[in-house]
Image (cartoon, rainbow, N blue to C red):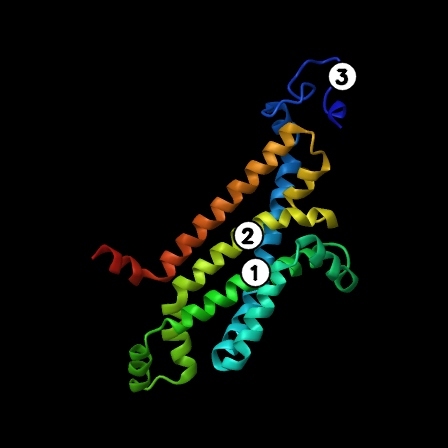
Amino acid sequence: MLASLAPASSDNCLTRNEWICGRYYSSRAGELTDALVQHVGIVVASVLLGLAVAIPLALLARRYRKLEGLILGTTTAIYTIPSLALFSLLVPVTGLGQATVVIGLGLYSLTILVRNILEGLRAVPADVRESALGMGYAARRMFWRVEVPLALPAIMAGLRVATVSAVALTTVGAILDYGGLGGLLISDPTFKAQVLATSVLCVALAVVLDVLLVGLQRLLTPWTRTAAAR
């Protein structure tokens, strides 16, 4: 593989297989960009899927206490399944490719998201609910206008953990030929420049997404900034 990147007779960082190699970055920029875009797409799709499933599950656990143990126990049990085993269990149903990776990662995010959504909603003070009822808020309006905003810090904390976790686990999807940066990471584990570049990009992506979510949380919960400034 390294030989295909540069003539065998040339003495450069590629043929010497160095960790830091400018020629690699210039010759593989397009490949790195494509892998990074795919990685971001997998992470975003899987976390959104997890959130879409976690919200109704958390509401069910909140309303029916008898179901809480079952829901939390099931989501925790899913998280204990090794990623390779989980993908293998999904393949007969969803096939090889994008759907299996996204669904698998979405299932992994449930244990974090369900707990945080449930804890956030339960942390809303009872007197706040009573005040909202006294002001004529119906159950649905109180949920969206009072409970969800107050639960947002806990929900966003879970979303941050789920997102960073998905960035790391997405690389495992390379075994199904759909793992973003993971595909480059495992295609030639002896290619030092490629291993370093993909590893750094994974870490950078996790940091960037986490910072973006922190910014989104601050935007959605301006009252927390006011309270902290006092």
Question: Which is more N-terminal, label 3 or label 1?
Answer: 3
- Answer with left or right where residue 89 lies relative to residue 140: right
Q: Residue at x 77, y 65 (%)?
A: 93
> Residue 152 at x, y = what percent?
40, 65
Q: Which three-letter amino acid code belongs to the residue tagged 2?
A: Ser
Figure disc tally = 3
Q: CA distance from mark 2 to mark 3?
A: 40 Å
Q: Which mark is residue 165?
A: 2
Q: Nearest the camera: 44 or 80?
A: 80
Q: Circle 2 sits in a helix, a strand or a loop, which is it?
A: helix
Query: Of callouts 2 and 3, which one flags the residue occurring earlier in the amino acid sequence?
Result: 3
Q: Position of residue 137 (x, y in %)?
A: 35, 84
Report the residue marked by disc 3. Answer: 8
Where, quadrant-wise, is the C terminus in this rendering? Answer: bottom left
Q: Are marks 2 and 3 in contact (CB under 8 Å)?
A: no
Q: Amino acid at mark 3?
A: Ala
Q: Residue furthest right?
A: 92
Label 2 Cα crowd, 10 Å radius (few <14 / some 14-19 / many 20+): some
Disc 3 is placed on an element classified as: loop
The residue most toward the left is: 230
N-terminal-most mark, 1 or 2: 1
The residue indicated by pointer 1 is 109
Residue 160 location (% of width, % of height)? 47, 55
Residue 86 in sight: yes
Q: Which mark is residue 133?
A: none
Q: Position of residue 124 (x, y in %)?
A: 35, 73
